[in-house]
Amino acid sequence: MDPQELVPIATYLEATQAEIVRNALEAEGIRAVVEGSHQGALTGTVGVRLLVQAADARRARTFVEGHEAGGAEMPGSAEEPGG
C-alpha cells in the first residue's frame, strides 16, 4: 500500500463530529480529510468517513480510540479557568 494513500480510520453519523476529530488529528500533526459530509448532513444515515494517509493510520486510530474512551482531550474541550 502506498503510504500517501488515504485510508478510512473512523465513520461518524454527523459531519460535525467528524470535523471535530479531524481538527484534533491535525493539531497532532496528522493530516485528515472528511469524506461524505454533505451526504451525511442531508440524511444522517450515510456515514461520514474520516481519512488519513496510510502512513499515519495506526497513530490516528490510536488517537481516535483514546479520545472515544475519554483518554485524550480534544483542543478547546478544557474548561475555562474560573468556569
Image (cartoon, rainbow, N blue to C red):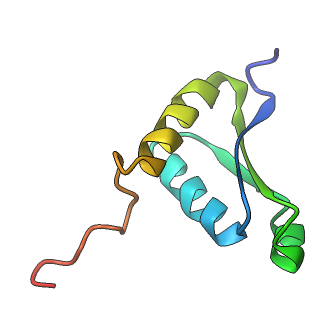
Q: Is residue 8 above or below residue 44?
A: above
Q: Quadrant of residue 31 in the image?
A: top right
Name the spot of residue 8 as percent of width and height, x first.
76, 39
Q: Is residue 18 above or below residue 11?
A: below
Residue 15 seen from this side:
yes
Residue at the left extreme, as displayed: 82
Q: Nearer the viewer, residue 44 or 24?
A: 44
Residue at 74% from the left image edge and 64% from the top image edge: 13
Total residue callouts:
0
Residue 29 seen from this side:
no
Name the image quarter holding the N terminus.
top right
Residue at 9% from the left image edge and 83% from the top image edge: 82
Residue at the bottom extreme, as displayed: 83
Lateral position of residue 37 relative to residue 16, left or right: right
Name the image quarter holding the C terminus.
bottom left
Q: Is residue 78 above or below residue 24?
A: below
Name the spot of residue 79 as percent of width and height, x first.
23, 74
Lateral position of residue 30 relative to residue 16, left or right: left
Name the spot of residue 59 as percent of width and height, x first.
52, 29
Name the spot of residue 27 as percent of width and height, x first.
46, 50
Q: Is residue 58 above or below residue 10?
A: above
Residue at 81% from the left image edge and 72% from the top image edge: 44
